[in-house]
Amino acid sequence: MANIDPVNEPYDDNLYFDPSVLDKKEYEDFSHFFQVDIVFGSREELINWAKETAVSHCHRLICQSRRENAQYMTCDKYGHGRQTNIDVEDPRNSGTKKCGCPFKLIGKRSRFDELWRLTVSDGRHSHRPTLFPHGQGTTSRITPQQKARIKELRNSHVKPMLIMDRLRKDDPTIQTSMKHVYNELAKIKSEEMEGMTVIQFMMHNFQKGEYRYWHHVDSETSNTITDIMFACPESIKLLRLFPYVILMDCTYKTNKYGMPLLEIIGITPVGRNYTIAVAFMSHEDADTYEWTLNCLKELLDGVEPDAILTDRELGLLKALPNVFPFSYHMLCIFHINRNVEANATKFMGGNKDQGLIFRRVLWAKLVKSETEEEYHYNYNEIVGRYAGYPRLIQYLNDTWLIYKEKFVRAYTRNVYHFGNTSTNRVESAHSSAKGWLNASTGGLDNVQGKLRDQVYIQISEMKCDFSLSSKIRKHTAAWPCFQGLICYVTHLALEKLDEEMESPAMQDPSICTHYLWNTHGLPCACKIVQKMEDNDTFVISDLHPFWSTMAVEPSELPEYQVNREEIVDRQIDDLNCNLKKMNYTSKINAVASLRGIVYPSTSHLSEPSFVNVMADGNCGYRCVAQAVYGDQERWPQVRGELLIELYEHASVYTAMFGSTGYVEVIRKCDWTSGPCPQAYWMDMNEMGLAIATRYSALVWSLIMYDCCDIAQQSFHVC
């Protein structure tokens, strides 16, 4: 027995036991359940009966070996496990169910009547019966019917957990585990890929589905994809119908590479948006954005949108004028307002009420200025009233008002944006896309099929709305001057006209600002009054064609489509003639490039590379070590080198952080080995300059906010 202190610790049979009992096995004999006078017509009948009998007593049998006239079956815990990982420094987190159980049955076929009979070689079990047989043994295997069900649900992008729930509801006695479902899903995907790599499979699907796609490769490795963009054919058809307003924004946590996913969407006259294209980007810099925008320009086929709406992405701000010089670039007013309110609160001593009042009153008045004179008047009012907060005024000037032409109404009031002044539509598209993707650990091929199915759903909803608009006569906008528009324009257009009828300008047309006409292409108050005075009615030619386009395919332009194909065929013929004139080496290089396009299954392109550093508190320094030395395990060296940088330029960093702050930065950086507590984690606001200076590198700090405004920070060193 274990030594027990009778004074300080009472004896408890549940806590203390004699280890020697582990060597003693308690056997329970089940022979009488199998010693029956039953004969079987075949080997399979004998095996099935024996297994079912064992299962009824919470045991499982397996077939060990077979001969022509004999079949041997044992308990699944028969024998001893292989000791393959005992001597390994870091063994797998696994075990064995083998415990030396002696249970053994022998089935024999008689030479006289060809029938099978069962004999018990050893009917004892040396272990307890299995209480819950779920997830183990043959009874938990997925049946062919369940496999077909899993494949059907997978094709509908149902999450594995919901697939398991559906299987359980179909068969409440099911013993399958989630692991079996995951394994079956992996098997289905492997069968679909037919031995192709992720890139080969994706490009094969691109060609099969008639996608438009573009990709960038790493200039150093020449075969690693760094950026890729694609659009399905249905999206391209919608883009040709509705190219007027385009919105774009990046979202994160959608793939295992950690690459930002740029979503590009358009709008329709029923108030719904559609996905034009998506792009996986390696960096959010001007060059990458310019490449992406040029791909979008090819999709537009010479047409420039009236307005492009984005957030304040500096790389995108720089690239847009180079690619779309005639499109009006607007900034999201929703995110501007939220940013202004947060910073106004900070500059006014953290008083949230003052920040909210500033944003809702004077700032809103400035943004809604109808003329440039009114804008300057409102700006001077802000400067005069908040002269005691010079940092607030400087922030407004340096961060937002340098882009006033992109969001102040006095400058955007003549742009056809159809009421889209924020990127909330893209935020909604992000949420929808992540719902389709189901997980943030998928590869590039995980997006392609789900994007197309998402577009199919969008088109289905549009068709329903177009059908309602063309058949249902809504009671709104029932004025005589609108009778020529009913069933010829969408319900959304009629609702906006109905709202315009309630405006004060209907009583005094002289105060009409023409905002609805200039930004939506719909009659404003003064035009409506004139029609009513003339006892006339509006027709669809009086409105922007956007509102009367109720289709999902540009079927009215078949000749244009034929001409486009002829143009492309001529370009291919010209390229072919020029290729034949090239030297032998150039021809070989051209053939190698074309082979990967024509036969995607032969492509040598590889997936984007990524390194997920260990999360041990030193992850910031591990990132620097990986970027600089290619080995995250050299993080102690990085900490030491950054300490040297802090000491060598003490005057610079003391001026930045103050004496106390400088000492604190050194203390947080001084950690030599093992996982570190939060007090020693890297703060990019403190170490960013030191990293950039020490390694002569460009350091990008990215802060992402989720729907709860919780910040997540990451950075790149290059």
Image (tube, grey):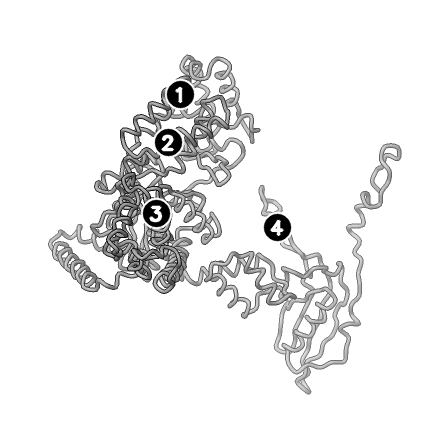
Point out residue 222 in the picture as x, y percentages from the top left corner.
29, 45
- Return the residue at label 4: 94
Point out residue 456 in the picture as x, y percentages from the top left corner.
38, 60
Q: Is residue 581 left or right of residue 241?
A: left
Q: Is residue 329 visible?
A: no
Residues at marks 1 and 3, CA–CA distance in whole angstroms: 35 Å
Point out the tag, 2 or 4, that comes first from the N-terminus.
4
Point out residue 100 in the picture as x, y percentages from the top left corner.
71, 58
Point out the frontmost of discs 4 and 1: 1
Point out the tag, 3 or 2, that comes first from the N-terminus.
2
Point out residue 658 in the picture as x, y percentages from the top left corner.
47, 14
Q: Nearer the viewer, residue 221 or 396?
A: 396
- Return the residue at label 3: 500
Point out the tag, 4 or 1, that comes first from the N-terminus.
4
Point out the frontmost of discs 3 and 2: 3
Residue farthest to the bottom, as pictured: 113
Residues at marks 4 and 3, CA–CA distance in whole angstroms: 70 Å
Point out the tag, 1 or 2, that comes first from the N-terminus.
2
**Tag 2: amino acid:** Lys
**Tag 1: amino acid:** Arg
CA neighbours of label 4 inside 10 A, class few (<14), some (14 to 19), many (20+): few
**Residue 679 sits in which quadrant?**
top right
Res 365 label: 2
